[in-house]
Amino acid sequence: MKILHIIPSLSPLRGGPSQAILEMVQAQRQQGIDAAIATTNDHGDTTFLAPYGQLIESGSIPELVGPSVPIWVFPRVLSQVAALREFAIAPSFAAWLWRHINNYDLVHIHAIFNYPTTLGMAIAKAKGIPYIVRPIGSLCHWSLGQGQAKKRLYLQILGRRLLRGSAALHFTTLQERQEALQAGFDGVSFILPHGVQVPEPIADASRQLRQRLQIANDAPIVLFLSRLHPKKGLEHLIDAVATLAEEKFTLVIAGSGDINYAAELAQRIEQAGLGPQVRQIGFVSGDWKTCLLQGADLFVLPSYSENLGIALLEAMAAGLPVITTPEVAIAPLIDQHQTGLVTVAPALAPAIQHYLHHPATARQHGEQGRALVEAEFSWPTQAARLRQQYAQLIQPTTQTSPATNLSPSLR
């Protein structure tokens, strides 16, 4: 079985999906699937250098973070116009894909509203190759409301036709599928979340983290680790911290992203007089990221919209209790398995206070979160489930239709 994954960017600056697809392909290859990725050299506002149009290992590119898997890289057009940069136009990709797409049994598209994945859908449709589209939240209410006029035009001219031509839409949660259905995307679909790598425990992660960031041993660490983007709702977390001046804890903000948004956050922190209580440490990866997750005491992601919430799964895998908002798709799972608290943004402060005052409960919820991830979100399990979906779509029968084998707790 040969599978081609297409995604506009593998840059860690683009958030969880770029990391997840590397782990997905690694897990698939370990199960005997001949999987590779086609992408651009996008790296946020810049690009990275790579041998273009050749099959290489992602581990050979310093800017990419995660397991090393086979990738094809094509140069993105450099532009001073943000919209064109985001669309990730890569002209040489078209000719390559037209020549090589027939070498694959199925194409797995990750994201929409960009050049590489639009091209992937169009050429797969023209060549009669089955393709799956994973919208990565692009068909959710919040996302469709951003840049609404451009997205409506894209969908009207081309997007809806290409999405209808897919063998299936791949959603990561029931909520994501329901929002897509409400928006009129009612084709064949299946639900299958990402897997998560459960790291080996670092015995002295708490000591290492506090020593590196110069945080007192008796000050609990509240961690935000995600892209700095308006949809993440970080301003609500900062406002919540500002109301907890009498509590002893440190907020660590890890991540990079939109420059203007980051500047607004820094100003908000300064105006609230939170300088001593907040550490802004920028983008993190590898062992340092693992140390952050295992050394912190509590994880908060007050997002306006998440089709899954990979950062929350990573935090639970590290044994952290989590606080998030109802708009995050795995919020019902967090409630059901008591791995954290789900609350509206204005009530973040009492949720944080609850865990600060009840450390035993925090530990218990963290342990339950790690157990949940190990049982239901391991990559070997998810890769096997995805392989079953591929087999149904490559050789469809009249008796079966795409459906996941998820346990009832994840439906």
Image: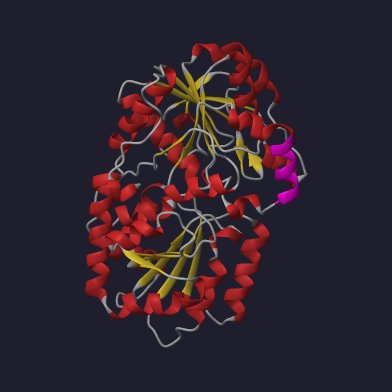
**Residue 387 to residue 223: above or below:** above
Q: Is residue 365 left or right of residue 41?
A: left
Q: Is residue 13 visible?
A: no
Q: Residue at x 49, y 48 (%)?
A: 178
* Color style of the picture: secondary structure
User: Image quarter for residue 246?
Assistant: bottom left
Percent of width and height locating residue 192? 39, 39
Q: Is residue 149 left or right of residue 365?
A: right
Percent of width and height locating residue 3? 45, 21
User: Image quarter for residue 403?
Assistant: top left
Percent of width and height locating residue 232? 54, 60
Percent of width and height locating residue 90? 68, 28
User: Image quarter for residue 121?
Assistant: top right
Q: Residue furthest bottom?
A: 246
Q: Is residue 381 visible?
A: yes
Q: Is residue 144 left or right of residue 290?
A: right
Magenta span contains residue 149 = yes
In the foreground, 80 or 165 = 165
Q: Residue at x 35, y 41 (%)?
A: 195
**Residue 27 to residue 220: above or below:** above
Q: Residue at x 33, y 36 (%)?
A: 382
Dominant SS in magenta: helix
The magenta stretch is 147-156
**Residue 397 to residue 87: above or below:** above
Magenta span contains residue 387 = no
**Residue 403 to residue 137: above or below:** above
- Quadrant location of the N terminus? top left
In the foreground, 27 or 132 = 132
Q: Residue at x 64, y 50 (%)?
A: 144
